[in-house]
Image: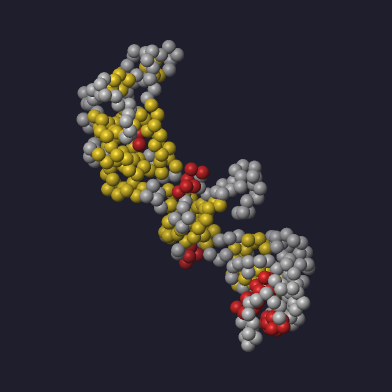
Amino acid sequence: MTPDTELAAPAEDEQGRGCVRRRKRGRIVVPLLVVAVVAGAGAAAVTRPWDHDSGSDKRSAVPYDLVAVERGSLSSSIQLTGALVYDAPTPIVPAGKGTLTGLPSVGAVVKAGEKLYEADGQPVVLMTGGRPMWRDLGPDVPNGPDIEQLKRNLIKLGHTKGLGLSADQKFTPDTATAVKRWQKALRLKETGTVPLGSIVMLAQESVRVQQVSAQLGSAVSGSSAMTVTRTDLVVTVQPAENQISRFKPDGPVRAKLADGTTVEGKIRSLVRGSGNGAEDKSGGAGDGSAAKTTVTIVLDGQERAQRAGPSAVTVNVVGDTADNALIVPVTALLALDGGGYGVRIAERADGADGAAPRLVKVQLGLIADAKAQVTGDVKPGAQVVIPK
């Protein structure tokens, strides 16, 4: 020990509790145990003074271990298990009236302009738009954004050639002509009007059928008949509360797929659970406990993701990295009075009797995985003191 500070070991008091005494001479240095609170791969240093009891005179050396200072890389990245899933599950609620006479197969991919399902023997067609249909459309209806959506689809599907039709909110005679062309292509009666329930408007230009919940012959009842998703795969993870801060918008991520390949990606969204026990957006029923936060990650290598298919993945959230760093356990750090941190370095590597650990002040760098990057009068291989 240095003449500045001498550590005392636990001694039994009248109640049988251990205590620690400290004798000080000259300059005061107060060693504090640094407790690493690891949040994911990051860690926060929290100090706690050595306990002491002035009512006991029993003293002995504090038991300790020695750990070598390492030189290497330290990273604050965190690793979690996630799931590779199809993006944006969306329930389909049939509109209008009638009987379901045709349903798609699970896994089927339907593009805009194609039949999604069938009601009363008539195809219900997928079109692209952000607003659901809510009324019959024809020459006598008031102007509205639903007409604009319909006209955009008719233009994109190629049914407006030579008509000079623009995507406005008016149902013009040319709009009726384009509708008749669309109906002819589907082998339907050419009425020039679009009844409610004959079109499903979704934001996606193509969807994949994930689940079919309705039965053939059941009535259109205002409940979900099926669930569709986008055709792209994304990764979802549910981090612990103390890991959420590591997920930054557009932050870099690496995903290791089930077949062993690695795909780069970035964080798209973070949705916190409501915690009210209600049904959440992922389709899970609440149980009254706090719902978990879900992070969605988009991948760069969609082709590799499709080869792997829906499966478990390992997600590595990229953080800070320190290369060629001197690394010690956080338990070796001592908080010094006056500020800063130090470590005790054993003069003899074998820790034999007579070895006198010396206190060396260090500067802290990156802290991760209960390890700390330090700089100062410390060399690789030196033995630092840690409590047992």
Place of residue 316 in the rendered image (x, y in percent of width and height, measured from the top left): 43, 52
- Work out whether residue 353 can be spotted: no
* Residue drawn at (60%, 60%) of the image: 89
Residue 90 seen in the current view: yes
- Horizontally, residue 386 falls left or right of residue 3, namely right
Instruction: Residue 155: give x, y in percent of width and height.
Output: 62, 79
Name the residue rendered at 40%, 29% in the picture.
Answer: 48
Position above or below: 137 against 95: below
Q: Quadrant of residue 216?
A: bottom right
Q: Residue at x 28, y 37 (%)?
A: 362
Estimate the x, y position of residue 385 in percent, counting from the top left. Answer: 29, 31
Q: Nearer the viewer, residue 127 or 171?
A: 171
Give the colour scheme of this rendering: secondary structure
Task: State left or right for residue 230 relative to residue 214.
Answer: left
Q: Quadrant of residue 19?
A: top left
Q: Is 46 placed above or below 180 here?
A: above
Image quadrant holding the N terminus, namely top left
Q: Position of residue 203 (x, y in %)?
A: 61, 67
